[in-house]
Image (cartoon, rainbow, N blue to C red):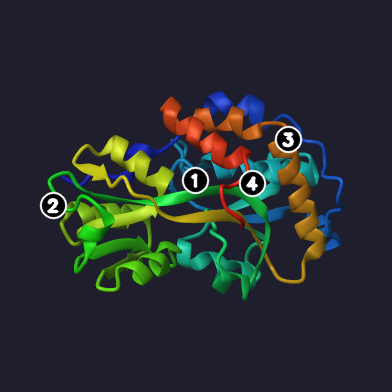
Amino acid sequence: MYKSISMLRLTVAAFAAFTLQALPASAQALPQAIKDAGVIRIGVKCDSPPFGASGTDGKPAGIEIELAKQIGIAAFGAAEKAELSCVATDARIPSLTGGKIDLIVATLGKTPTREEVIDYSDIYYWGSSRVIVPKDSTVQKLADLDGKSMLIIKGGSQLKWLKERIPSLEFIQLNTNADNLQALQQGRADGYVGDAITIATLAANYPEFRTLEEPVDLGFNGVGIRKGEDELKSFVNGVLKKLKDEKFYSKTVPTFVKDPIVAAEMVKSFETDPPAAQ
């Protein structure tokens, strides 16, 4: 029987005291329009643990959720001033450009195509993607995917990378991690590609799957910002720098990632420079 991804829901109760400590405001000024609004609207993922998922109380919870709250604290002195909205992968950029949100903090990989439409903050996270397959699959390496099918989140940046290397690979694009997980359980595709940490989390909770060792691509995540909003970009970059300098992620990641090896890798991806140029 399909096991709901809700099993992966995260709790933030033990983390509340740390989260609500006020982060001094960024040295950069907050744009007047956001000051006047009294809140900063941020799109987050609610289906991508440990970055963002639905918590046990139904509210968003995860590492990027805590990052978004810190932006609210820096802007207005209170985490609740970050007005969080769940956004599907393919709705992130339209929600931003359409004025529904002010920022995207939702596993947003930096790509040339996206940079034609929106601007990015400084990179706050880097990492690869991975492929998960059924444990009894004959697929042992990426080359074995020749002529097979792959599940991927709509708008996922891994699609271009895989198409260039495995032209015969067919893609099934679904809206959420839960949709893709269910489809893989139902045998509708040969594998599922996603962010390495998300895939590792799924593999740890669903023993019927295993992860291919080869990494897929190297991605860089930043906060999505509308083009021309340089003042807001400077403000966000100031917050990101302060969080990195204060080892915010070393304190935050273990709350949402219980495996110490995975947690250490995540902290490295948040707090160190990437192995390649952006």
Q: Name the residue under label 2.
A: 138
Q: Mark 4 points at which residue?
A: 68
Identified by mark 3, the residue type is Asp
Identified by mark 2, the residue type is Thr
Lateral position of residue 141 relative to residue 88, left or right = left
- Between 272 and 159, the residue placed more toward the observer is 272
Identified by mark 4, the residue type is Ala
Lateral position of residue 232 relative to residue 212, left or right = right
Q: Name the residue under label 1.
A: 52
Q: Name the residue under label 3.
A: 245
In the depicted structure, whether residue 158 falls above or below residue 48 = below
Structural crowding at the residue carrying mark 1, measured as other residues with C-alpha within 10 Å and reported as few (<14), some (14–19) or many (≥20): many
The answer to which quarter of the image holds residue 100 is bottom right
- Between 175 and 197, the residue placed more toward the observer is 197
Q: Position of residue 216 (x, y in %)?
A: 39, 55
Tell me the SS state at disc 2: loop
Tell me the SS state at disc 1: strand
Q: Position of residue 176 (x, y in %)?
A: 37, 58
Lateral position of residue 5 relative to residue 97, left or right = left
Of the numbered discs 1 and 4, the one sitting upstream in the chain is 1
